[in-house]
């Protein structure tokens, strides 16, 4: 069976010289690009992040500020929180001097 496969492979046309090397370089460059892409993450302005790692759990003592950060793929995951102050509108009916109810609202941050 193995001899039949070798004979079949010998009859197939071969590609241009250096094709195997170029293919290996292309696959290697793709693997490196994928690894770098998976190792980098960005924390935007108004956000903070902490790490979750698969062995120790959440690392609460390390708070990451905004910017570009690195992680170990598959082992560490960033958990990103929005820390911006959000305005809250508080509405309440109030009474006037003549006994009418008027709507009043205030915005608090």
Image (cartoon, grey):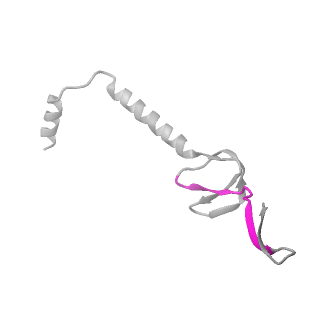
Residue 108 in which image quadrant: bottom right
In the image: residue 36, left or right of residue 69: left
Q: Which of 27 and 41 is in front in this view?
A: 41
Residue 83 in which image quadrant: bottom right
Above-or-below relation of 91 to 61: below
Quadrant for the N terminus in the image = top left
Q: Residue at x 72, y 59 (%)?
A: 86
Above-or-below relation of 72 to 6: below
Q: Position of residue 79 (x, y in %)?
A: 62, 57
Residue 22 in which image quadrant: top left
Query: Magenta segment, which residues?
Result: 74-94
Quadrant for the C terminus in the image = bottom right
Q: Position of residue 50 (x, y in %)?
A: 66, 57
Q: Nearer the viewer, residue 65 or 17?
A: 65
Q: Does the magenta stretch include residue 85?
A: yes
Residue reaching furthest front?
98
Q: Residue at x 53, y 46 (%)?
A: 38
In the image: residue 38, left or right of residue 94: left
Residue reaching furthest top?
17
């Amino acid at each position: 069976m193995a001899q039949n496969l070798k004979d079949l492979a010998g009859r197939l046309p071969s590609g241009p010289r250096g094709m195997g090397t170029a293919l290996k370089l292309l696959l290697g460059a793709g693997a490196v690009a994928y690894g770098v892409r998976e190792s980098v993450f960005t924390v935007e302005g108004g956000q903070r992040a902490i790490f979750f790692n698969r062995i120790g759990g959440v690392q609460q003592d390390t708070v990451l500020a905004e910017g570009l950060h690195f992680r170990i793929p598959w082992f560490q995951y960033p958990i990103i929180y929005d820390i911006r102050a959000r305005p809250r509108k508080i509405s309440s009916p109030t009474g006037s001097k003549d006994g009418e109810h008027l709507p009043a609202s205030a915005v608090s941050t």
